[in-house]
């Protein structure tokens, strides 16, 4: 129940507003650690990934407190919540996820409601998701109405490729889990498109392409790689006409300005408009890291503030930056590694999507809850339920269907 509330807090916008809900979140974290400690002494957290996560969390909190005071700690609390959620994910790796399997459908159902409310608001006001993140009466009203902003949009962007991946790998039996996944995929895709966050769209499309490129034998993967390279070559040759066509199609939407800036950047050989602003922030973080690569600049104010990965290296230096990169990007793949994977390549898809998100944006709690808890729970549940019936069928075209490996791993987990 503690884990259930933590997930709800990350995915339900209303719970982030009032102090009682925040106090309940702290109680859920404390209650979970206490119950786990009573049950088996938190022995399952005495491993390398957990130690690195705690090291990164402790060091960054200390630097924030010493350089910026409590205000700096509050500013970074969303990422801290993300890291504590990662610790919970570490505790439930592998077969222990069976204990959380009952949460998958309720959490997806709640997520669908949050996404539906957000999409409804975006249909009435295309800027609703951007208004939510501001400190204003209008933003507070939107939050109380269940409208999500930056956090929820990027949580949906990270989850959509995984849901797409699991859809491809299954034959969709008539089950509650299948309906919950289908609804969440549709709602996530609709909100990402309606929100107008260009990077979120790139994350979804890149993750889906990675899902399409996974699986099969060596020859199949080689053929797909050649097709992707050929498509990339054609795209580079026809890039400007394609962007012009897309810009015309996007006329009247929030993507038109972004596409116009991108076309002008390519034609001039330098970035302009929104592209220029983002690039300048990335370069600022890179230059700060180059000036102090070992221990970083330590202070927050001078950072580019548009890339969690670059800002971490710039502020804390290379040693802590490498630990942070491992925890934030590599850890989700490790959490999925002992799960039934088949040819779906869930770790690769999730790691790619998370790398794009944290490389081009700042990290928050909701995407962390998706990457470190919901994604492993969902993959494990699908391996045990959605694919079990297909494992007994003969594979087509002489190739073993990925479902067989899902079901095989599920049987091993049950043993």
Image (cartoon, helix red, strand yellow):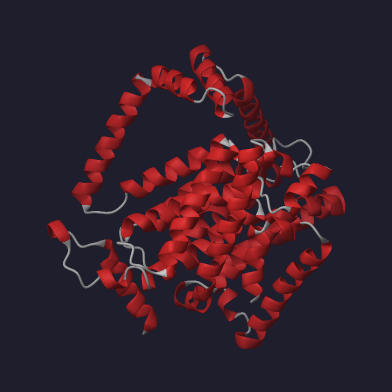
Q: Is residue 318 visible?
A: no
Residue 344 versus residue 142 in the image, above or below? below
Question: Which residue appears at 49% of the width and 13% of the height?
Answer: 267
Left or right relative to 96: residue 8: right
Residue 101: x, y in percent? 49, 74
Q: How many marks?
A: 0
Looking at the rendered image, the quarter that the C terminus falls into is bottom left
Residue that lies at the very extreme toward the bottom in this rendered image = 39
Left or right relative to 312: residue 186: left
Q: Is residue 57 visible?
A: yes
Quarter of the image for residue 255 reads top right
Residue 295 versus residue 184 in the image, above or below? above
Residue 316: x, y in percent? 69, 47
Residue that lies at the very extreme toward the left in this rendered image = 398
Question: Which residue appears at 15% of the width and 59% of the height?
Answer: 396
Quarter of the image for residue 162 reads bottom left
Residue 206: x, y in percent? 43, 41
Looking at the rendered image, the quarter that the N terminus falls into is bottom right
Question: Which residue appears at 66% of the width and 70% of the height?
Answer: 5
Left or right relative to 211: residue 318: right
Question: Which residue appears at 51% of the width and 75% of the height?
Answer: 102
Residue 120: x, y in percent? 61, 46
Left or right relative to 170: residue 186: right
Residue 78 versus residue 44 in the image, above or below? above
């Amino acid at each position: 129940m503690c884990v259930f509330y933590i997930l709800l807090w990350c995915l339900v916008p209303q719970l982030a507003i009032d102090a009682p809900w925040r106090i309940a979140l702290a109680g859920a974290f404390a209650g979970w650690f206490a119950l786990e400690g009573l049950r088996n002494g938190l022995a399952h957290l005495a491993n390398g990934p957990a130690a690195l996560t705690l090291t990164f969390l402790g060091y960054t909190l200390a630097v924030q407190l010493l350089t910026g005071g409590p205000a700096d700690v509050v500013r970074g609390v969303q990422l801290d919540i993300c890291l504590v959620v990662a610790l919970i994910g570490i505790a439930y790796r592998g077969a222990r996820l069976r204990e959380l399997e009952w949460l998958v459908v309720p959490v997806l159902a709640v997520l669908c409601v949050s996404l539906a409310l957000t999409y409804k608001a975006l249909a009435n006001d295309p800027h609703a998701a951007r208004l939510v993140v501001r400190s204003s009466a209008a933003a507070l009203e939107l939050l109380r109405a269940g409208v999500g902003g930056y956090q929820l949009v990027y949580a949906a962007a990270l989850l959509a490729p995984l849901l797409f991946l699991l859809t491809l790998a299954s034959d969709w039996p008539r089950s509650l889990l299948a309906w919950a996944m289908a609804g969440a995929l549709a709602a996530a895709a609709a909100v990402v498109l309606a929100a107008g966050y260009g990077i979120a769209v790139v994350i979804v499309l890149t993750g889906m392409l990675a899902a399409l490129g996974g699986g099969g034998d060596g020859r199949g993967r080689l053929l797909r790689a050649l097709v992707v390279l050929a498509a990339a070559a054609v795209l580079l040759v026809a890039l400007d006409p394609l962007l012009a066509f897309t810009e015309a199609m996007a006329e009247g939407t929030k993507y038109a300005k972004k596409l116009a800036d991108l076309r002008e950047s390519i034609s001039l050989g330098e970035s302009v408009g929104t592209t220029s602003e983002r690039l300048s922030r990335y370069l600022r973080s890179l230059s700060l890291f180059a000036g102090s690569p070992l221990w970083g600049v330590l202070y927050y104010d001078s950072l580019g503030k548009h890339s969690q990965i670059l800002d971490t290296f710039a502020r804390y230096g290379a040693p802590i930056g490498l630990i942070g990169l491992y925890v934030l990007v590599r850890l989700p793949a490790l959490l999925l590694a002992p799960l039934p994977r088949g040819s779906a390549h869930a770790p690769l898809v999730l790691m790619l999507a998370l790398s794009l998100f944290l490389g081009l944006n700042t990290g928050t709690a909701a995407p962390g809850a998706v990457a470190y808890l919901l994604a492993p729970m969902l993959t494990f549940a699908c391996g045990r339920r959605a694919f079990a019936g297909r494992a007994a069928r003969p594979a087509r075209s002489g190739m073993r269907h990925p479902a067989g490996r899902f079901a095989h791993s599920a049987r091993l987990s049950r043993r």
